[in-house]
Amino acid sequence: MSQLRPEPLAREFSLKFLYQCESEKLYYFSHNHFNSFFSYFSVPGNIQEVAHRICEGVFNKLGEIDNFIEKSSNKWKLSRMSVIDRTILRIGTYELLESDTPTKVILNEAVNLAKTYGTEHSGRFVNGLLDALAQRLRKAS
C-alpha cells in the first residue's frame, strides 16, 4: 500500500489555520496558537511539519505575498476578496515563491481547495490569479 503524500492535507489544514488566524485578527505566526490548533485536530506529525512550514512562511512573507497578489489581480484589492480566496492565494503564492513543487501541482491543489471551501466562482478566480502570478514570476526569473 502506498503512503499518501502529506502536502494536500497540510495545505487544507494550513487554510483552516490561517483562516482562523484572520478571523481572530492574529497577523503573526504564534507557535502556541499553531500547536493548540493542530493538537485539537490531532493532525499527524508529517502533515503538521509541512503545514508549519507553509503557515510560518506565509506570515513571514505576508507583505511580499500580498504585494504579488495585488499586482497580479486586475481591479481586485485584497480587502475585497473573500477570506477563503485570499488565504488560498496566499498559500499558493508562498509556494510559488518558496517551494520546488511544480507550478501545475500548486495551482491544481489551490483550485481544489477553492472549489471545496469557496464560492462557486472561487475555483476560476484562484486559478486565473495564481496562473497570472506564476507567469509574472517566470518572466522575472
Image (cartoon, grey):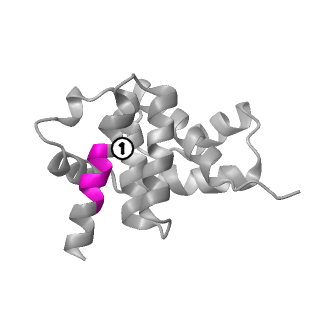
Question: What kind of residue is marked 1?
Answer: Leu
Question: Chief secondary structure of the magenta span?
Answer: helix
**Residue nearest the observer in this picture, 26 or 66:** 66
- Tell me which corner region of the image, top left, top right, bottom left or bottom right, holds residue 32: top right
Q: State the residue at coordinates (36%, 44%).
A: 89
Residue 41 appears left or right of 101 = right
Is residue 110 positioned above or below 49 on the image?
above
Residue 27 appears left or right of 3 = left
- Tell me which corner region of the image, top left, top right, bottom left or bottom right, holds residue 1: bottom right
Question: Tag 1's secondary structure?
Answer: helix
**Residue nearest the observer in this picture, 16 or 25:** 16
Is residue 27 positioned above or below 72 on the image?
above
Residue lying farthest left? 75
- Tell me which corner region of the image, top left, top right, bottom left or bottom right, holds residue 98: bottom left
Q: Residues within 10 Å of mark 1 (few under 14, many from 20)?
A: many
Task: Report which residue position mark 1 lands on.
Answer: 89
- Residue 128: percent from left, percent from top: 28, 44
Q: Is residue 15 visible?
A: yes
Q: Is residue 132 magenta?
A: yes
Residue 140 appears left or right of 125 = left
Is residue 140 positioned above or below 131 on the image?
below
Quarter of the image for the C terminus: give it: bottom left
Q: State the residue at coordinates (65%, 42%).
A: 35
- Count the marks: how many? 1
- Residue 47: percent from left, percent from top: 69, 51
Q: State the residue at coordinates (18%, 45%).
A: 70
Residue lying farthest right? 1
Q: State the residue at coordinates (34%, 56%).
A: 61
Q: Is residue 10 magenta?
A: no
- Residue 25: percent from left, percent from top: 38, 29
Q: Is residue 18 visible?
A: no
Q: Which residues lie in the magenta part?
A: 128-134
